[in-house]
Amino acid sequence: MHIDELAGHLDSWAMDLGFQQIGVTDTDLSDYTPDYRAWLEQRFQGDMGYMARNVEKRTDPSKLMPGTIRVISARMDYLPVTRGNVLNSPDKGYISHYALGRDYHKTVRGRLRALAKQIEIHAGGQYRAFTDSAPILEKPLAAKAGIGWVGKNTLILNQSAGSWFFLGEIFTNIPLPINIELQEDKCGTCNACINVCPTGAIVGPKQLDPRRCISYLTIEHKGVIDEELRESIGNRIFGCDDCQLVCPWNRFAQASNESDFVPRHGLDDPTLIGLLAWNEEDFLTHTEGMALRRINYSQWVRNLAIAAGNAQPTPDLIRAAEEKLAESLRKGDTLASEHLEWAVQKLNPH
């Protein structure tokens, strides 16, 4: 199949596989490289040491997969169809929208591989598929491919779809036509995401200090969470969606009908008491195949402890926190115990 004819089929193939949009760009990231290096120099990566490794590959896709001359960027929506107002229910635990269903790495990467195979059948060439799984500057590539623009919250915003979507890429040596219609930055004077951030992690337009970001603290950070940040975390036990929830462009976001992203095990509306009752086996059973497995059981209990400490005290919640503290002390889990001791003191200071 001729390259131009192939390009004409890409959209329909992608839609059939559950993607809502794709775009094609070259591998030149020179306009974005200085900002990334400056971000690293400020040590904003925190515990994410991998962000400082393979910088040359991140800033030049052809070094990650030799021969790469094009990147196909794709988005897949994941917004749940319905969900209660968990953030305003301190007796419940809030899990970020993206983590409620099947692990997106599995779904998106599998579909990208299927798309790459379809292209290979018709045009040959070489391909590798990625989704948040390799040293890649995904958001700059998405912007260059016309998927959207980098918003003030550092996420990709799309003028007709908001930001509730996953990104994925296919690297190829096939000279596909490049998208020339890019989306203009339309954040304007809006600072809603900056103002709403509970911990002040968005330190300026398009500048995020992950070390204060609740998503980083509850997922990437492996150790003790500073006491000064705990109250601001509220009842967020895995990730944070605040900067997306207030973004005006998300009024255009469409709910996903992808069955893989349907919330599992009632985790879109869970009570803290119910979650504190889980032992490690329960945690592993109820999070199997989900992005929640990015944290271990000790981190899970740490996060629950902070949410419990920020909740309204009730006899049942106090009892649940005390029982979980006793369990953690028996196991010698110092990380969980430290946060549970804080929670019990907050819940029952006398």
Image (cartoon, grey):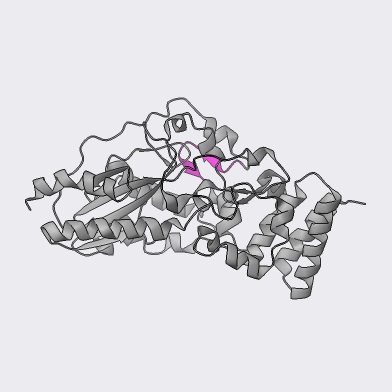
> Which residue occupies 15% across, 43% down?
8
Foreground of the two, 38 or 290: 290
Picture coordinates of residue 59, whole percent (x, y): 31, 55
Instruction: State whether residue 284 is above or below residue 21.
Output: below
Picture coordinates of residue 294, whole percent (x, y): 53, 62
The image quarter containing residue 303 is bottom right
Picture coordinates of residue 291, whole percent (x, y): 50, 58
Q: Which residues are magenta?
A: 200-208
Instruction: State whether residue 248 is above or below residue 317.
Output: above
> Which residue occupies 15% across, 49% down?
176
Question: In this image, 245 relative to 25: left or right?
Answer: right
Q: In the image, is residue 204 part of the stretch drawn in magenta?
A: yes
The image quarter containing residue 15 is top left
Picture coordinates of residue 327, whole percent (x, y): 77, 69
Foreground of the two, 273 or 172: 273
Q: Is residue 225 visible?
A: no
The image quarter containing residue 223 is bottom right
Question: In this image, 224 relative to 248: left or right?
Answer: right
> Which residue occupies 69% across, 63% down?
278
